[in-house]
Amino acid sequence: MEHTVLVALFLSFLAGTATSVGGLLAFVIKRENLSVLSLGLGFSAGVMLYVSFMEILPQASQSLVGVYGDKPGEWLSTGIFFGGIVVAWLIDTLLPSHHVEEHTLDKSAKLKHLGFFTALALAIHNFPEGLATFMASMKDATLGVSIAVAVAIHNIPEGVAVALPVYHSTGSRSKAFWYSALSGMAEPVGAVIGFFVLRSVLGDASFGVMFALIAGIMTYISLDELLPTAHEYGDGHKVIWGVVGGMMVMALSLLLF
């Protein structure tokens, strides 16, 4: 039992550290190359939109349908998804930079705000992923490894999404790295809480609610934060190809793993 718990915690930690790899990849992009920044932000939006609609929301719906039946489960997952959008809007509105008029914010401040908001949302997203990795590993180590590998691959572009705007706004490699690393550390935190607190009470309904909420939050970030900022730094064609590229990378990771 003790060995199984340690393996489960280790796999969750390993999956979470993959955001740090994405954070390091962001440093390859020169700060002066704004067109690449535009492409990168579009890529990040593509990753988040695709994973929200093709993985997270369907999982939420499946979990809630299994508990409440077809129609109630579908209505509930849809309602919570839009509730997640409202939650993201509230978080966005309450962040300090939004107390200043938009035209007074320089681009660096907006990029830094974007990095913080993305890190916060991905931390919320990574928390139940860590919990899921832990629970799966407790039941079956092989299944846990498969989920941990898949989550780790997904986390690499997510780390880029966090580090890229922070690095370009501050010029600080350490800040960009730690923002991305800390957003990933929500996964082992989720695993630890799962072991000590929630192991006996979590079920399909709880996971369904969490994942539907996360899908809404990530959709809001992509449409209201990532894409508008990407358009400020490059033309529309670069942005859309970045979005398509992000979707393709995430699609391949889901198909292969």
Image: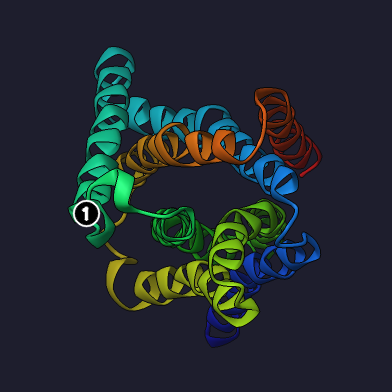
Other residues around mark 1 within 10 Å, as few (<14) / some (14–19) / many (≥20) = few
Report the label total: 1
Above or below, 91 relative to 219? below
Question: Which of these two is toward me, 42 or 13?
Answer: 42
In x, y percent, where is residue 246? 70, 37
122 displayed left or right of 9: left
Helix, strand or loop for disc 1: loop
8 displayed left or right of 223: right
65 displayed left or right of 254: left
Question: Which of these two is toward me, 224 or 74?
Answer: 224
Above or below, 107 relative to 166? above
Q: Quadrant of residue 236?
A: top right
Which residue sits furthest bottom? 2
Above or below, 212 relative to 201? above
Question: Which of these two is toward me, 169 or 15?
Answer: 169
> Residue at horizontal 68%, vertical 49%?
37
Q: Quadrant of residue 216?
A: top left
Residue marked by disc 1: 100
170 displayed left or right of 193: right
Quarter holding the C terminus? Answer: top right
Above or below, 14 relative to 205? below
In x, y percent, where is residue 61? 40, 27
Which residue sits furthest front? 104
> Residue at horizontal 60%, vertical 85%?
3
In x, y percent, where is residue 117? 39, 56
> Residue at horizontal 23%, vertical 33%?
83
Say what amino acid the circle numbered 1 marks. Val
Q: Quadrant of residue 57?
A: top left
The colour scheme applied to this rendered structure is: rainbow
In x, y percent, where is residue 8? 57, 73
